[in-house]
Amino acid sequence: MNPLFSPIKLKGLTLNNRIVVPPMDQYSAQDGLPGNWHVMHYGNLAASGAGLLIVEATAVEAPGRISPQDMGLWNDAQEAAHKSMVDTIRSYSATPLGIQLGHAGRKGSTARPWEGGKPLPADGAGWEICAPSALPYAPGHQTPAELTTADIARLTRSFVTAAQRAVRAGYDSIELHAAHGYLMHEFLSPLSNVRADAYGGSLKNRMRFPLEVLEAVLAAVPGNYPVGVRVSGTDFVDQGWNIQECAT
């Protein structure tokens, strides 16, 4: 048998095959709530026969959204809406459902891609953004506020709370988003992290926040519950995050 179609066990979760539908942002939520579009979209994908379906990047706090239309999991109403969606999909498909939890960091507060994807001003339709260092993502983007150590501790708790909500909502697994230039990747990359404290500088320090989040989330969910991390292997830029650091 082709290994692609053979079962695989991820802690307490067994997948019928190794085909995974990855997170694909829809930018179609209202107040962070999954709606009818999401039920239809993910319900259709869950009927595909894939071994695992991972729901799109879901913000752990309101300022962690990429766009105003991102999904969220930071309040009770959102948790209830996620549970309703999961329950509806489960009534038609046994495909395990995962969710990707993340924070946009300095790439947040932008319009939807089909609306140009341009940065939204904090004093307009957008909001203030944050990052490891006060370095804008690109010309024309907001300069993010540099996170304090207290902010970092608060964000770790936000990831934990969102993970606990995901478990209660019925998701079978969690993927933490540490890729694509979003917040946890911003800590990893020396191009976006120029801090001089325990969260910047050396590789060990730059990895500290993502590893603290992972450790805290693992401690907050059941012991046999699968938790993974999505990483970018390289920044594809000299002096940036690279394959050797990623493999460490």
Image: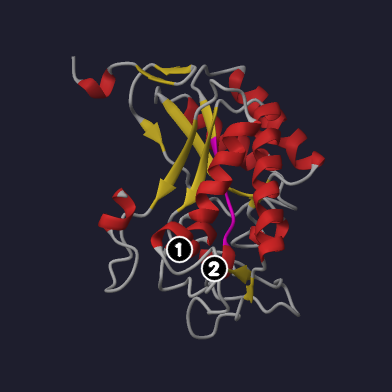
In the image, the segment drawn in magenta is: 99-104
Identify whether 148 is placed above or below 19. below
Relative horizontal placement of residue 139, taking residue 119 as reference (left or right): left
Residue 205 place in picture, x, y as percent:
47, 60
Q: Secondary structure at mark 1?
A: loop
Quickly name the residue at label 2: 107
Magenta region includes residue 151: no
Classified by dominant secondary structure, the portion drawn in magenta counts as strand
Relative horizontal placement of residue 12, taking residue 222 as reference (left or right): left
At label 1, the amino acid type is: Gly
Residue 46 place in picture, x, y as percent:
49, 27
Residue 113 place in picture, x, y as percent:
51, 65
Instruction: Point out the image quarter for the N terminus.
Output: top left
Residue furthest to the bottom: 139
State the CA–CA distance, disc 2 to disc 1: 7 Å
Identify whether 4 is placed above or below 235. above
Identify whether 15 is placed above or below 202. above
Query: Residue 209 versus residue 41: which sits nearer the camera?
Result: 209
Say whether marks 2 and 1 touch (CB < 8 Å): yes
